[in-house]
Amino acid sequence: MAMKAPASAQRRLLDLNKVDTTLVRLAHRRKSLPEHAEVLRIQAELATIDDELTAAETAVADGELEQRRAEADLEPVRERRRRDQARIDAGDVDAKALRGLVDEVAHLDRRIGELEDAQLEVMEQLEQATATRDEVAGRRAGLDTRLKEAVAARTKAAQAIDTEAKGQLAVRAGYVVELPRDLFALYEKIRQHVGSGAAALVARRCEGCGLAANASDLRAYAAAAADDVLRCAECGRILIRTPESGL
């Protein structure tokens, strides 16, 4: 036996179906927000720049270590030269020892020059590494700011959709309470299966699947009582008769 429901309740299914279609569209919009894509893109950039920043910070740390080593190599040579020079200045050594000290000071001066050149090179490399690190850190800070702005924009867009969806859900709830339980249960079952539970019959064509009814089905539709719940023979949706059905 065909399900029975008042014609007005059947027509209300079209309103309910319109709301459900809107809710599906809103859910898709929320999932595919361009603001969300922007957040993901910036996060990917951050992941890349974090690797770059780690490498830059490592280069600075290595440079600082090399600078300390260069200073550590230089200081004892300078100290030895100061001691030798102090002995020369004191004049309390014999001529042979003095010549030895003078030769050693000359050697130490050359060694100090070599070490200072090496130290200068290390300092220049450290300066460049520090500049690179600061530049990368600046770009990362800029990305952090952009990410915060993108997240805020995404949240705002999502909230706008959620507000609209909340309104549609309230309208839906109002429609549902008007419907007979068995009719709504059938609608929901079909909707879960094919995406929409009801469709209008317009110009002898189901607006759900878009297929035209054959002559036999049209005769059955035309002969059905107003409270008979019809189903599309092609897609199974609840078929709602309208003045434009062409029956």
Image: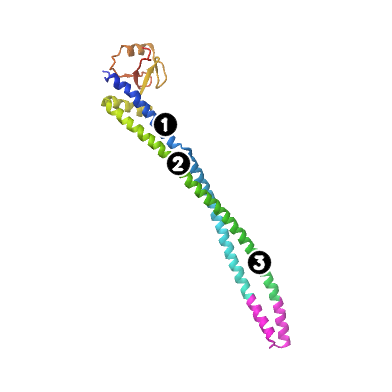
Marks 3/2: CA distance?
A: 53 Å
Of pointers 1 and 2, the one earlier in the residue sequence: 1
Picture quadrant of residue 89:
bottom right
- Left-right relation of 132 to 95: left
Tell me the tag on residue 242: none
Picture quadrant of residue 182:
top left
Amino acid type of the residue tagged 1 in the rendering: Arg
Q: Is residue 179 magenta?
A: no
Q: Badge 1 local density, few (<14 within 10 Å), some, or many (20+)?
A: few
Q: List the residue tagged with mark 2.
A: 154
Between tags 1 and 2, which lies in front? 2
In-front residue for pair 243/237: 243
Disc 2, SS: helix
Where in the figure is residue 81, as x and y percent of width and height?
66, 78
Q: List the residue tagged with mark 3.
A: 118
Q: Badge 3 local density, few (<14 within 10 Å), some, or many (20+)?
A: some
Any part of residue 196 in sight: no
Where in the figure is residue 157, as x and y percent of width and height?
44, 39
Q: Residue at x 58, y 68 (%)?
A: 68
What's drawn in magenta, residue-wise? 78-106
Residues at badges 3 and 1 in contact (C-beta under 8 Å)? no
Q: Is residue 100 magenta?
A: yes
Of pointers 3 and 1, the one earlier in the residue sequence: 1
Q: Residue at x 49, y 40 (%)?
A: 37
Q: Badge 2 local density, few (<14 within 10 Å), some, or many (20+)?
A: many
Disc 3, SS: helix
Marks 3/1: CA distance?
A: 68 Å
Q: List the residue tagged with mark 1.
A: 25
